[in-house]
Amino acid sequence: MLALADGTIFRGQSIGANGNTTGEVVFNTAITGYQEILTDPSYSRQIVTLTYPHIGNVGTTPEDMESSQVYAAGLVVRDLSLIASNWRSSNTLQEFLERGRVVAIAGLDTRRLTRVLRERGAQAGCIMTGDKIDENAAVHLARRFPGLKGMDLAKVVTTKQAYQWNEGSIWQDESRPVIRAQQRLHVVAYDYGIKRNILRMLADHGCRVTVVPAQTTAAEVLTLAPDGVFLSNGPGDPEPCDYAIRAIAELLETDIPIFGICLGHQLLALASGAKTVKMKFGHHGANHPVQELQTGRVLITSQNHGFAVDDATLPPNVIATHRSLFDGTLQGIARTDRPAFSFQGHPEASPGPHDVGPLFEQFAQAMIRRLQNQLRALRASARRQGS
């Protein structure tokens, strides 16, 4: 049984681990990528409802894990496929859920559930499985969930210690030359809940990556001599992450290029003086149209967030670069006085379309320009000393 905090009850069949789970119930409109969604740390403390009705037909594979474990609090689907048929599949979705101890439910009306969430907003819920199902107890557990507003989850899901990442995409483009490690740009990536495909995309664009915990100070990052700083996606409310906001504000005092996505986008805005707001039901899916304001182009994007930057609070040195065509919310910003920019969606497209992938190239070009400027300054200094 799935019980919502407003008392709405849905019944179905358990397709995962036994037990109960609570979290914020959200809906995701992606057609593919259920394994990537489940293992995205941004879904920590959330019960994910997949609106596409037929789920599980391609099974699961270790290659498609976006982190080391399942972070979603639970899963809700309409119809679990009876078979998994794909040459890459190693386990069925049900086996994957049971092994990951994920409480999940199938066989309920996900269209009705989605309408409830769309009209009343994302709300707390409880999935209860087992021989003894108590509606009142399930509703009570749902109502006890405190909600994501004010919840700092970045420091919960982050890595415990720094590590190096040099692995590129699983499906390498053979036409692209291999970049030697010593020639690569050095990116320090803050892990607020980072996804593996983000790291692969950075590696594909000529970067060697040092991933650091969320609470790493700006001084510690600067000792690593980065060419650029990346601010990752992640779960929860950005405003309580005062440690991250403070570190980003200090890094903005340097000339080091900064690129943020999702939670990193919101943290960059907060560090620049803007504010964030909790959305009614958020953006979760792989079909969200976003307009690039400078060119007018429309990009189809992958989204996963329940908070947004309030564009009415942007300071004069921050401009809007992208806007959602679903609800007009801010999707991208850039600093006018620093090489820093961010995007609300997930440009690494795991799952999702690749329309916003060029942002990684923009980040790499910003780092190269900084190195070129440093080289020109050194040459000019050498000429002055020689004369």
Image (cartoon, rainbow, N blue to C red):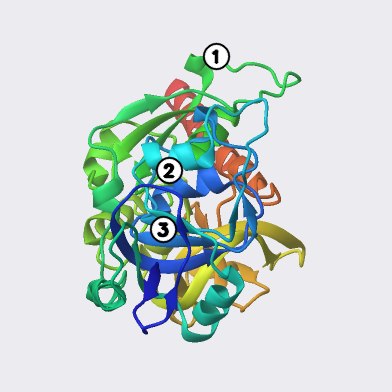
Q: Position of residue 76 (x, y in %)?
A: 49, 60
| Residue type pointed to by label 3 | Leu
Q: Is residue 247 above or below residue 312?
A: above
Where residue 157 appears, as percent x and y from the top left, is: 29, 47
Q: Secondary structure at mark 3?
A: helix
Residue to which mark 2 is pinned: 97
Q: Residue at x 72, y 59 (%)?
A: 299
Residue 85, disc? none
**Screen quadrant of the N terminus:** bottom left
> In this orientation, which residue lies closer to the viewer: 17 or 230?
17
Give the residue type that dot 2 points to.
Answer: Leu
Q: Where, by quadrant of the figure, is residue 376 drawn?
A: top right
Sequence-first disc among 3 and 2: 2
Q: Amino acid at mark 1?
A: Arg
Marks 1 and 3: in contact by CB < 8 Å? no
Q: Is residue 344 shown to the viewer in this render?
A: no
